Image (cartoon, rainbow, N blue to C red):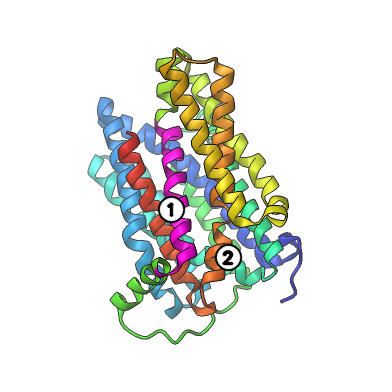
Amino acid sequence: MTSSISPFSQPVFRHLFAAQITSLIGTGLTTVALSLLAYDLAGDDAGRVLGSILVLKMVAYLVIAPIAGGMAHLLPRRLWLVGLDVLRAGVVLWLTFVDQVWQIFVLVFVVNAASAAFTPVFQAIIPEILPDEKAYTKGLSFARLAYDLENLASPALAAALLVVWSFDSLFMANSLTFAISALLIMTAHIPQAAPTDRVGGVYANTIFGIASYLKTPRLRGLLAVYFAVSSVGAMIIVNTVVLTRGVLGGSEMLTTSFLACAGAGSMCAAFLIPRLIERFGERPLMLMGIVAAAAAMILGGAFMMVGGASVVAYAILWSIAGAGTTFAQTPGGRLVQRSAGDGDRSAFFAANFALSHGGWLFAYGIVG
């Protein structure tokens, strides 16, 4: 396949990117709907329910991703991705019929397990359809933008839909987005996985990706960066409301605005990454990003210790933290792609997915 600087010149990338955008929007709607469903069923214990859901999500990622990544080379990838999208569509649709808290836990675990099996295989396909490293870097940046846009757009879209729909209908909308994603993938020309000489059963294939990842020096360094990113990200997600409401005495709008500042910083960084990587290289850019993000958190803590700072100052720090984490983590896909053999990409991306989310599980506990 010919390479191009623009990833959108490749029809397969256009299909896969559209599938990503569609499913991300639907997932954002379900995040809002789950909050409302938890409150509807658990009342004042909704926070505990949502916290448990978050833990279940990370556990599903940690357990399922390595298994799926290790076994993905045994099945046609188009069938794998479409089947998992159909499964997610059905499970999310079933959430509309839930009337017990334990049912939420079961269904959320299943849908996140499906996502853990889906995402690494999806990520492993991108460098194959974008063999030019510049095009792949732009593809990674667009993927980062998609996540940030989802974080900004989904709550607003959910609020608009709730004007005319009940929150149960948001689950139906998410089910539809997964079905659309499956259709887009079905109509894309997914390349066959490269052959691999790996042998062995489920256990050997499961530990292959994790063991190979941890034996690679550059990936051990990347994992340290991911843990630092998760620490900053968890601080923003968990404690923004504490800062804006408890310290600054603001409203819910201020909390939303601070989260938007972090998202805007991340989006600006995603736009700049392809150009900055060409100029500085991956290692300096990633180090600069994590140092900037850490410095923003340290300054924020220092301001609180000496009596606080203005709302504008904290908003700037949140923007710097958002940009820094994106500079630090987005180039990681290039390192994983460069470290894996053609037939082993799914296993390496699955290990990357699982281990990086292990950092989030750890960080959520510490920050909370």
Q: Is residue 333 above or below residue 193?
A: above
Residue 283, horizontal then vertical, whole percent = 58, 55
Direction from residue 299 to residue 93 in the image, left or right: left
Q: Inspect this view and state whether residue 217 appears.
A: yes
Residue 37, horizontal then vertical, whole percent = 35, 35
Amino acid carrying label 2: it is Ile
Amino acid carrying label 1: it is Ala
Q: Inspect this view and state whether residue 167 appears.
A: no
Residue positioned 57% across, 41% down in the render: 324
Label 1 packing within 10 angstroms: few (<14), some (14-19), many (20+): few
Q: Are marks 2 and 1 in contact (CB under 8 Å)?
A: no
Rendered-image quadrant of the C terminus: top left
Q: Is 261 one of the magenta-colored residues?
A: no
Say which of 63 and 208 sits in front.
Answer: 208
Direction from residue 68 to residue 267 in the image, left or right: right
Q: Which residues are magenta?
A: 215-238
Label 2 packing within 10 angstroms: few (<14), some (14-19), many (20+): many
Predominant secondary structure, magenta span: helix
Direction from residue 95 to residue 83 in the image, left or right: right
Say which of 75 and 166 sits in front.
Answer: 75
The residue that mark 1 highlights is: 224
Kindly state the secondary structure of the residue where label 2 is placed: helix
Q: Is 225 one of the magenta-colored residues?
A: yes
Say which of 121 and 356 sits in front.
Answer: 356
Q: Nearer the viewer, mark 2 or mark 1?
A: 1
Q: Is residue 31 above or below residue 178?
A: above
Q: Is residue 314 above or below residue 65?
A: above
Task: Measure how far apart labels 2 and 1 are at the Cα level.
Answer: 33 Å
The residue that mark 2 highlights is: 185
Residue 139, horizontal then vertical, whole percent = 65, 58
